[in-house]
Image: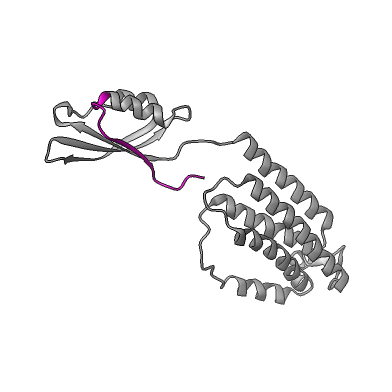
Amino acid sequence: MDQITSLFTFNGVEGSPTIWMSLAAMVLAFVLSLIITKVYQITFTGERYSQAFVHTIIMMSVVVSVVMNVVSGNDGVAFGLFAVFSLIRFRSAVTNAKDIAYIFFGLCVGMTAGLMQFPLAIVLTLFASLIFYFLYKVDYGKGKDTQLLKVTVPENLNHENLLDDILDEKTDFYQLRQVETTNLGTMILYTFAIRSKVETKDQVLLDAIRERNANLKVSLSYLEMRD
């Protein structure tokens, strides 16, 4: 219990912060969250940008700094308040993993500021922002999403291994998902799940397949929205 209590003390002295310290914590959380959201805007690569999400990060950081002020001197209030928070459900789910990281980033900065660890909050913001920006600039971890490849083949050219050599060369993974007849049985439609190699361009893959299937229809679609 002593270890838990020590988390809610300031400079080793248990008690509540003054109103001016609380105000300073809110101001710092606000300024640092502006930096966080600016980095988010710079590194954003998705398709649907949300101004409301940016505002949410700022407000959550400021509010959490106040919450940490409230619970810092009372263990019972702390556990009761976090129990209440556990009952909250958000109406919309965050599907982008990067957005979740930014939410947690803003929360951590707000918590650190609320515990009056001002230098640590500043260092955390600057260091983590540099990491986010570095990962964005170097495009670290870049890969290809799983795609659906649909190839129409004339019935007289139909055999199971028609595209195997092309897919072996151009993809890291492929799997035949479906085979069906079209155009009154004169055509065969193959559906593959593939993951292209990083260096493989979509147009190059499509051109290679068109040379093999008598230049009939070939389509390539992504299973998930690309970032």
The reply to whether residue 187 is visible in this rendering is yes
* In the image, residue 197 lies in the stretch drawn in magenta: no
**Coloring scheme of the render?**
one colour
Q: Quadrant of the N terminus?
A: bottom right
Looking at the image, which residue is at 84% across and 65% down? Answer: 24
Regarding residue 1, the answer to whether it shows in the image is no
Looking at the picture, how far across and down is residue 202, in whole percent?
Answer: 41, 32
Image spot of residue 209 (x, y percent):
31, 27
Q: Residue at x 29, y 23 (%)?
A: 211
State the extent of the magenta-drawn residues as a range: 212-227
Tell me where residue 75 sits by quadrant: bottom right
Picture quadrant where residue 142 is located: top right
Q: Is residue 23 above or below residue 148?
A: below
- Is residue 132 positioned above or below 197 on the image? below
Characterize the magenta stretch by its predominant secondary structure: loop
- Count all numbered tags in the image, as a single digit: 0
On the rendered structure, is 226 left or right of 150? right
Q: Is 132 situated above or below 119?
A: above
Nearer-the-camera pick, 18 or 147: 147
Q: Relative to the observer, which residue lies in front, 86 or 106?
A: 106
Q: Does residue 8 appear left or right of residue 202 in this picture?
A: right
Residue 221 counted in the magenta span: yes
Name the residue nearer the viewer: 57 or 107.
Answer: 57
**Residue 3 locus on image (x, y percent):** 76, 64
Front residue of 148/70: it is 148
Q: Residue at x 71, y 62 (%)?
A: 61
Q: Position of residue 227 (x, y in %)?
A: 52, 45
